[in-house]
Amino acid sequence: MTASNGQLIIAADDYGIRETSKPILALAQRGKLDRVGVLVHFTSPDEAAALLETGVQIDIHLELIDFLKSGDQHARAGVFGRGFNFVWRYAFSRETARQVEEQWESQVLRFHELFGRFPDGFNSHEHVHYFPVFFRVFMKLADRYHIPYIRFGTSGIFRGEQRGMVAGILSVLRFRNLSLFKASGLHSSEWMTSFDWLASPQPSSWRLPSGTVEVVVHPERADEYQAILEHF
């Protein structure tokens, strides 16, 4: 399950969207990845079949792209515009938990159509499942479909040397969800971090906490692709 010293889980996100499939598939075929998060509405049957052949753990990357205005069709909105839209709709319940459950369950069923089985794990695009309203839906569906692994971090979010705002927000949200996670009996890595929160592209210089660490990567970025190719 791990790619280097028994402590790292290298998890590539966004399979299917934009130019992600080709580099992710190339790394999976070389045995460089442990997990791949698939965006089912952007993944073709041929891309699904090719990924299955690699034997990598295949997770569903649940998304609310229209909710966040974060896909290609919303690129002009910018980070601030997308963030404002998300906070507005989240705070004022413009998108209810029931509607989110319907969207996510349809994606799980689409995954089953593409891959002939249910996912090996759950995570989400732009980490939206950490928001408590969504986390309850996330956990409900994980239980319903007997998903063995979720992205959470039993010991915490490792913010890395960059210590950016996103990692800080996720740390707070994770703490709010901790009791629900503990009651679930689901499995996760001890820590979760992202390649772009770490100061160096050279994994040998990473100062990671002890225990299993899920490192989220985006191999369509040249520096991340090269680091994975050379060091794992």
Image (spheres, helix red, strand yellow):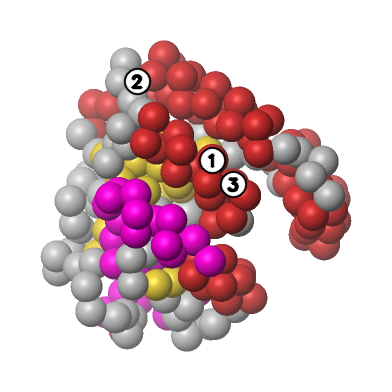
- For the record, the magenta segment spans 176-204
Question: For the residues marked 3 and 1, what is the alpha-carbon distance in whole angstroms?
Answer: 5 Å
Q: Residue at x 44, y 43 (%)?
A: 139
* Discs 3, 1 touching: Cβ within 8 Å: yes
On the image, the x and y values in percent for residue 14 come to 50, 43
Q: Earlier in the sequence, mark 2 or mark 3?
A: 2
Disc 1 marks a residue whose amino acid type is: Val
Secondary structure under badge 3? Answer: helix
Q: Quadrant of the C terminus?
A: bottom left
Residue 198, magenta (yes or no) = yes
Answer yes or no: is residue 126 visible: no
Q: Which residue is mark 1?
A: 137
Query: 140 left or right of 126?
Result: left
User: Can residue 80 be seen in the rendering of this structure?
Assistant: yes
* Nearer to the camera, 56 or 102: 102
Few, some or many C-alpha atoms within 10 Å of disc 2 (few <14, some 14-19, many ≥20)?
A: some
Q: Identify the residue position indicated by label 3 in the image.
A: 134
Q: Nearer the viewer, residue 2 or 183?
A: 183
* 2 or 1: tag closer to the N-terminus: 2
The spot of residue 115 in percent (x, y) is: 35, 20
Residue at label 2?
115
Residue type, numbered disc 3: Phe
Image quadrant where residue 147 sits:
top left
**Residue at image coords 20%, 34%:** 55
Q: Judge depth for marks 2 and 1 and give the one in front.
A: 1
Label 2 or label 3, whichever lies nearer to me, is: 3
Q: Is residue 108 left or right of residue 52?
A: right
